[in-house]
Amino acid sequence: MDYNGFLATAVEAAKKAGEVIRKGFYETKNVEHKGQVDLVTETDKACEDLIFNHLKKQYPNHKFIGEETTAANGATELTDDPTWIVDPLDGTTNFVHGFPFVCVSIGLTIGKVPTVGVVYNPIMDELFTGIRGKGAFLNGNPIKVSSKYELVNCLLATETGTKRDKATVDATTNRINSLLYKVRSVRMSGSCALNLCGIACGRLDLFYETGYGGPWDVAAGIVIVEEAGGRVFDPSGKDFDISITRIASSNPLIKDSFTEAFQQSE
């Protein structure tokens, strides 16, 4: 397996899509609703086509899962075959509002294990990369997770999700309220992939999200976090399952304290 080749091809695809996102970021957007608050734009669709066309030329025998096409058709089953899992524009709401936390996320799983990851924010020109066993990088420089070991000193990231029914909103805000007493502060950047990269480079100490879109939100970020020395797990403390939309991430020192606090907030 040519992991360096996989990474180089993914970076090329991410950079191409990034140009489209950068151009569209400063223009008027045509926006559609996928749900009550979940948005999709022409840029999402154009970038997914561009990325998949680029990858398929190099790897016609690989499988592909994307947020806008494959997921819409309900075909998201992950097999052991090399599979590219792509979110062409993570942070669409940010994109629509001109808030600069948007990215392309391209992950490659082999044997269902995330193995290569590329997350590119074209507005801030930050390229996060990782290959399993070979480290994680930001714009070519090695990165590692923070060394915080007390919750009170930690910066926590989360998201509110896309559901707005009263039960979900109450559960979400009650949990945040409970955790706010135990951490330094909370951030919501609007991008699951960039939150994972924030853990990887030490900007964030803790991150959790429940009910995110699907594996395309996390496939690339998982590799980058773990190669930066971080942990990815279910917020309850159990092993992470890519087929279930629950994720948490932190440095190794704070994981147990966080899972305990999370369980108390349920």
Image (cartoon, rainbow, N blue to C red):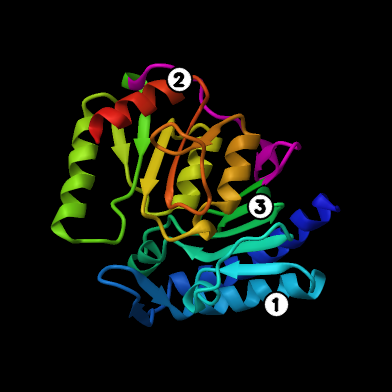
- Badge 2 element: loop
Region of the chain picked out in magenta, as a range: 130-151
Q: Is residue 65 visible?
A: yes
**What residue type is disc 2 on?**
Lys
Q: Quadrant of residue 106?
A: bottom right
Residue annotated with mark 2: 148
Q: Position of residue 199 (x, y in %)?
A: 50, 36
User: In what quadrant of the picture does the C terminus appear?
Assistant: top left
Residue displayed at 58% across by 56% down? 120
- Other residues around mark 3 within 10 Å, as few (<14) / some (14–19) / many (≥20): some
User: Would you say 196 lies left or right of 83 here?
Assistant: left
Query: Quick check: can you spot residue 126?
Result: no
Of callouts 2 and 1, the N-terminal one: 1
In the image, residue 237 sits, relative to residue 195, either above or below, namely above
Marks 2/3: CA distance?
31 Å
User: Badge 2: few (under 14), some or many (20 or more) residues near its Cα, within 10 Å?
Assistant: some
Q: Which residue is mark 1?
A: 53
- How many angstroms separate mark 1 from mark 3 (CA)? 22 Å
Q: Position of residue 41 (x, y in %)?
A: 42, 77
Observer-nearest residue: 18 or 64? 64
Horizontally, residue 201 falls left or right of residue 148, namely right
Q: Secondary structure at mark 3?
A: loop
The disc at residue 112 is 3
Residue drawn at x 79%, y 75% is: 57
Q: Marks 3 and 1: in contact by CB < 8 Å? A: no
The stretch drawn in magenta includes residue 213: no
